[in-house]
Image (cartoon, grey):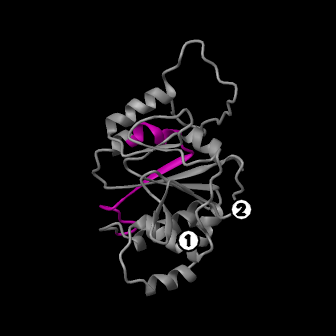
Amino acid sequence: MAECIYCIVLGESKDEHNEAILKTWTKHHDKAERYSTKNDSLFNILKMTWMQMRKIYNYIFEKYGDNYNWFFLASSTTLAVIENLKHFLFTRDISQPSYLGHTIISGDLEYVTMEGGTVLSIESMKRLSLPNKSEKSADLRTWKLSEDMELAVCLKYEGVHRNAEDSKERAQVVEGACCSVMDNTFNGLTPKKMIVIMYGVYQNRAFEHYFNDTLVFLPPNGSDND
C-alpha cells in the first residue's frame, strides 16, 4: 500500500475556514473529511470533548482502517502540504505505533499539539480503538485536560509515545507564515493566508530553478487538486 493518508479536520460547522479548507489543501489529500461540533447526527456532538473524539477515532478506524495507513488530525486553522508530509512519512514503518507532530511539554506530559496537526500510524489507531487500559484510565481521571493532552495520555497507556526526531526529522510546523522549503504543516492561519500559502506552494515557480531531490506522489483518481 502506498503512503495513503486520511485527514480528519475538526471545527465548527459554521467556521469561516470551511470554504478555504475545501478549496485549498484538503484537495491534495487521499481523503479528507470534516467533523464538526454542531448538527452532527452521527455522533450527536454538542461540545467537542475527549470522549466524543474517541467515538470519532473508533468510527474512522472501523470504516477506513483497511484503506489508509496514516491518519492526520488537524484543526480548522491548520494547512498541510500533503506531498511534504508523505515524503516525511515515506521511510517509516506503519506497523510501528507512530505518534508524530509538534511537541509540547507540560509537567511530566509530552504531547503533540493539535494546532500543528497530529499524525498517527494505523498501529496507533488500532491501539487507540481498543477499550482496555485507556478506557479504564479515563474512569480514574478527574482532572480536565485539552483533547490533544488526553490523546497523549491514552496513547501512553497503550504503549504509544511521541516518536523521537533526529536532526533530519525535526518538527516541520510553522505558525502563521512560511520559513522553510520543506514544511509539512502551518497553523494559526486565516482563510486568506491559506489561499496565499497554497499559491506560493503549488502555483508560483522561480525561473530556471530546478530541484534534484523530487519525490512524486500522484493525486488520487478523480481529484481536482491543483
The residues tagged by marks 1 and 2 sit, at their Cα atoms, a distance apart of 15 Å
Task: State the SS at label 2.
Answer: loop
Q: Which mark, residue 210?
A: none
Q: Does residue 126 appear to the left or right of 177 in the view shown? A: right
Q: Residue at x 58, y 44 (%)?
A: 85
Q: Is residue 129 visible?
A: no
Identity, as a three-letter code, of the amino acid under mark 2: Ser
Q: Residue at x 50, y 30 (%)?
A: 201
Task: State the SS at label 1.
Answer: helix
Instruction: Quadrant for residue 127, please give it.
Output: bottom right
Identity, as a three-letter code, of the amino acid under mark 1: Leu
Q: Which mark, residue 95?
A: 2
Q: Does residue 21 appear to the left or right of 151 in the view shown? A: left
Q: Position of residue 145 (x, y in %)?
A: 38, 72
Q: Which mark, residue 155?
A: 1
Q: Which residues are magenta?
A: 21-44
